[in-house]
Image (tube, rainbow, N blue to C red):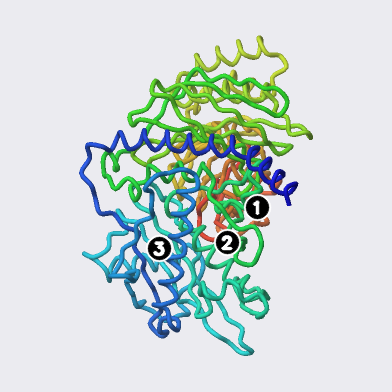
Amino acid sequence: MRKFACSLLLLLTLAMPALADETSTAQALQERVRAFHADAPHEDLKLRVIYFHPADREPQSNYQARVNRIVLDIKDFYDTEFARIGLQDAELPLEMDGEEVKIHVVKGAENHDSYGYDVQYGLKILREIGQQLRGQVDPEREFLLILCGLCDKQDKGVYKIYSPYYGLGDANQVRGICFAADCEMLDTLNLTKTKEPFRYNEHNRDQRRSLADFNTVFIGGMAHELGHGLSLPHNHELSSERDKGTALMGSGNYTYRAELIGKKGSFMTLASATRMLSHPLLTQSNKQRFDRGHVRVSDVTFQGTGKALTVRGKVESNIEPFAVIAYSDAEGGSNYDAFQWTEEVRPDGTFEITLDEHKPGPNALRLNFCHVNGATSEVSYGFTANERGEPNIQALQDSLIKGDIEQKLRSGDFHAAHTLAASYWKAHPETTIAEFLQQCQAYQGNTRLRALQDVTENAVFLSDIQAEKEEVEFGRPTRNAIYHSRRRQGSGFFLMPGGQIHGKGLYAHAKSNYTFALDGTWKKLTAVAGLQPGAPEQGSVVFIVQGDGKELYRSERLQGSNVAQIELDISGVKQLELITQAAGQGSRGCWSVWGSPQISR
């Protein structure tokens, strides 16, 4: 017994420095945020719960009592994690009706078969909620958890679930919307029923779980999607955090409350808590809430030894940045596998943070700066890690200079971009971005468009030719470079379908159409079709070529780095159309590109 007690004491002693470090960091960050809001009027902001059901279905059985237990349990999870991390007097505020969670019930305008999982249905439900609760709820400036009673019990006791289940992607300090499914079998009272089998169908897939597992996944999923609604991104627990369980914003929906049945449950990372502690729901302040943060990051340096990567720099902003979260995010995986570290940004804007865990292969180093008003800003650098997880410092330095050059290209300062590219290449012949630097020195901006009848050469790029029609779903038609916006972090400057740089090409965010008038004398079209790197993973596109209204070519559904090599006979064609269509759930992430589209005689 004494030996056991000594061992336990040793384990606690070893764990204390890490715990103390997390607690002291969290409390220092909280003090910074509270100092900023000290002179602001106290607001009464609440997380509000909406219950939606279709016109031909009643709410799920016993929904009031079940939803009350579920939402209060999720609040308890958040509040307990805030306290464990070290935040003081931090709670997730709910809109209450006495001792019960206030539930706003909205009956849909249409029957159950008019709703489904896809984003279009979530937006449709949100519009109906806005119409019915006008003057009571403002989806543009509030934080809403929307539970959808879109679940039917079918033959043999199988439940079919067809509800939206996600956080809308524009969550920030101004508003946040998330959707989750309700089912009459969802109840915190069922979290321990491991012996009872349960069958359900979601996304047209039959599933078999225990009733306990079903509740863990779906109630945990609700807590996870609420995180997205409160602007939390995916992140993964570090190896040093595995004793705590699974990060909620990683795969924590699969382990939610698993401690009730003797397993490791879910927890909140310091990174998630840091983003939350400046959220208006916790600060109860509107001070600068509706201002957008802008950052300038300078004096960035990278230093590495083994797996450890230390990043130093300085950040300037119109809204005080109080913390930096560094994510080491492996390519793919929808950020679920993004390791995370958190440090304070000093009052003078300088910061230093060390990352010591990376997946082998291509990665992104994302620096997320948290502002005191709840906003965040991010910069990103690409790098690779070897099979031992050791980062390539040269690749990070290359990524840093690449960003500087791209900024000059976007601003139109081509001479400065050419000069910087040439000098860096000369000083760093071992660079990993030689092709990029070569392309930079050749780039002269969008060339003056030519009328096709003036072309005397036997081949010409369509990006150099006047079009009859050019339309894209998002942004504006752009030639020989990617359309850039603040949301396109990591998209680069040059067109790069499949990761290969193309000096000539057409940005064509699906759905899109570029139409060219030919004279019937051109015989061949060649192009490389694919998505721009950095596109959200749900983006998928079909590329189509039409000649005189007849379909000449249709690609397979292209996603990620997949490309289609196009070589097509266009003999006699007088009207050539290059078309892209979204192939997935909506057009988000459909950053489609026609690389080097060339016609020849």
Task: Decide which of tag 3 and tag 1 comes sooner along the chain.
Answer: 3
Task: Decide which of tag 1 and tag 2 comes sooner along the chain.
Answer: 2
**Label 2 sits on residue:** 256
Residue at point 32%, 70% (across, down) = 99
**Label 3 sits on residue:** 145
Q: Nearer the viewer, mark 3 or mark 2?
A: 2
Mark 2 lies on a secondary structure that is: loop
**184 to the left or right of 92:** right
Mark 1 lies on a secondary structure that is: strand
Counting from the top left corner in percent of width and height, residue 336 is at 61, 49
**50 to the left or right of 132:** right
Counting from the top left corner in percent of width and height, residue 238 is at 64, 42
Amino acid at pointer 3: Leu
Tell me: residue 423, above or below residue 165: above
Of 536 and 52, the residue lying toward us? 52
**Label 1 sits on residue:** 558
**55 to the left or right of 182:** left
Amino acid at pointer 2: Tyr
Of 55 and 528, the residue lying toward us? 55
